[in-house]
Image: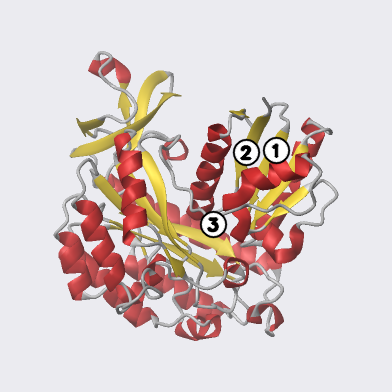
């Protein structure tokens, strides 16, 4: 029996696909071992969204080769799709469209076959989650947006939605295995269903799916992946707010608070339209957690445009912001745009926004001090010299519950209601 070590990089879709690959190898009798141990087969599910992601992908592939020079090293996913599969450390390169055939391809390589016939078309699905408390469920693939900075539509392709029945079957399986929270993810989940027969307007098929999942026995929490701000309408918010199991945690991708920059990015909304979407959510939900992504140093971004973005972020007041320095991706329109911003300027602007993010996040979490919170526990950790169980609220605030005060009644996958009394170190709980 051979053993396999897997490593995941990148987005939640990659996390789902890595979990699925792990399950497929286990079902074929392979032993799964940690990535830092000696293994017969190393699989790196790569990412190429930024230059840093490319570098991490290469580093992990090289690390695998050093750990066992005789092992089969397999590069999977977006880095491969973008042309990064020619590294000397790689024995086998597998694109996104062949991930479902990973076991057959590895076994074909081991048997010395150059071409692998995978037989009948099959669609594997998760039956359990290694994480148990929370499971990512991929509901669609691909993106048709073609933002000027983004390589992902070129490596993931056009949108392709899974059927509701297929998604519900998978969710039923993971819930029966003990999962209490499902996270709906995809490359662009706001496009879910547009390619299906009788496709509805943006977001309507997604809403139909969420409502059907909410009706399923055993699903206690539904969390949504990144949403397009344009699909947030009063009717959307009204339907979502009617679902008690829906987590009031909305990741609305922004990228810039400056309209001129948004236009160069080929984002199909203005900052004013984005703010309206936020206001709609805050009208229908009590203090929803609004999170976002922001790119600094996009080509042509002047200091004035950056200041407009900062002012807009202060106006919205997010729970969390993921700040990225613009990364030039060959093959995208932005790569050839004039006005490429120097790295030192990007770093300074990123630092400013990271400081603002920390301030806003702490302010959002401060609301819980003196309140009671419902927490889904996930892992036991030693913090500040004491044993705690750590988990998340529905709006994705991390909370630590001291073990001693509960006399052993805590554990993974348990829901508890606890009074929140103080902050632990921010770095520990973020």
Report helix, strand or loop for mark 3: loop
- Here the colouring is secondary structure
Q: Position of residue 293 (x, y in %)?
A: 47, 64
Q: Which mark is residue 175?
A: none
Which quarter of the figure is the N terminus placed in? top right
Q: Residues within 10 Å of mark 2 (few under 14, many from 20)?
A: many
Residue marked by disc 1: 42
**1 and 3 marks in contact (CB < 8 Å):** no
Q: CA distance from mark 2 to mark 1?
A: 6 Å
Residue at point 65%, 77% (across, down): 332
Q: State whether residue 220 is above or below residue 206.
A: above
Q: Could you tell which of marks 1 and 3 lies nearer the N-terminus? A: 1
Q: CA distance from mark 1 to mark 3?
A: 25 Å
Q: State whether residue 315 is above or below residue 95.
A: below
Residue at point 69%, 77% (across, down): 335
Residue at point 34%, 35% (across, down): 391
- Please state which of the two labelled residues, at mark 1 or mark 3, is closer to the viewer: 3
Q: Which mark is residue 6?
A: 2
Q: Position of residue 227 (x, y in %)?
A: 37, 66
Residue marked by disc 3: 121
Report helix, strand or loop for mark 2: strand
Q: How many marks?
A: 3
Q: State whether residue 24 is above or below residue 95.
A: above
């Amino acid at each position: 029996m051979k053993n396999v070590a897997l490593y995941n990089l990148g987005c939640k879709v990659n996390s789902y696909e890595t979990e699925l690959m792990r399950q497929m190898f286990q079902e074929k009798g392979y032993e799964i071992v940690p990535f830092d141990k000696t293994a017969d087969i190393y699989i790196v599910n790569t990412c190429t969204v930024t230059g840093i992601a490319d570098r991490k992908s290469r580093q992990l592939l090289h690390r695998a080769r050093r750990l066992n020079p005789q092992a089969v090293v397999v590069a999977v996913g977006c880095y491969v799709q973008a042309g990064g599969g020619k590294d000397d450390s790689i024995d086998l390169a597998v694109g996104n469209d062949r991930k479902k055939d990973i076991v057959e391809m590895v076994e074909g390589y081991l048997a010395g076959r150059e071409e692998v016939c995978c037989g009948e078309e099959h669609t594997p699905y998760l039956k359990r989650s290694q994480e148990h408390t929370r499971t990512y469920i991929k509901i669609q693939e691909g993106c048709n947006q073609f933002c000027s900075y983004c390589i992902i539509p070129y490596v993931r392709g056009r949108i392709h939605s899974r059927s509701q029945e297929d998604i519900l079957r998978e969710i039923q399986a993971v819930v029966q295995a003990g999962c209490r929270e499902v996270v709906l993810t995809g490359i662009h989940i706001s496009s879910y269903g547009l390619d299906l027969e009788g496709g509805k307007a943006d977001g309507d098929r997604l809403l139909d799916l969420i409502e059907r999942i909410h009706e399923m026995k055993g699903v206690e929490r539904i969390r949504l992946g990144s949403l397009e701000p344009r699909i947030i309408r009063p009717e959307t918010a009204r339907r979502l707010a009617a679902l008690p199991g829906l987590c009031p945690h909305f990741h609305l991708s922004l990228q810039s608070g400056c309209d001129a920059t948004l236009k160069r990015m080929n984002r199909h909304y203005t900052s004013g339209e984005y703010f309206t979407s936020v206001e709609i959510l805050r009208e229908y939900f009590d203090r929803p957690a609004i999170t976002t992504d922001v790119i600094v140093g996009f080509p042509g971004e002047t200091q004035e445009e950056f200041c407009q973005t900062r002012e807009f972020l202060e106006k919205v007041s997010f729970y969390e912001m993921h700040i990225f320095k613009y990364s030039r991706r060959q093959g995208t329109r932005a790569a050839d745009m004039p006005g490429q911003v120097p790295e030192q300027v990007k770093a300074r602007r990123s630092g400013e926004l990271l400081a603002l993010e920390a301030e806003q996040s702490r302010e959002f979490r401060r609301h819980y001090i003196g309140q009671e919170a419902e927490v889904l526990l996930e892992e036991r950790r030693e913090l500040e010299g004491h044993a705690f169980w750590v988990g998340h609220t529905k709006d994705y605030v991390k909370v630590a519950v001291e073990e001693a005060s509960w006399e052993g009644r805590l554990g993974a996958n348990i829901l508890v209601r606890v009074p929140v009394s103080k902050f632990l170190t921010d770095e520990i709980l973020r």
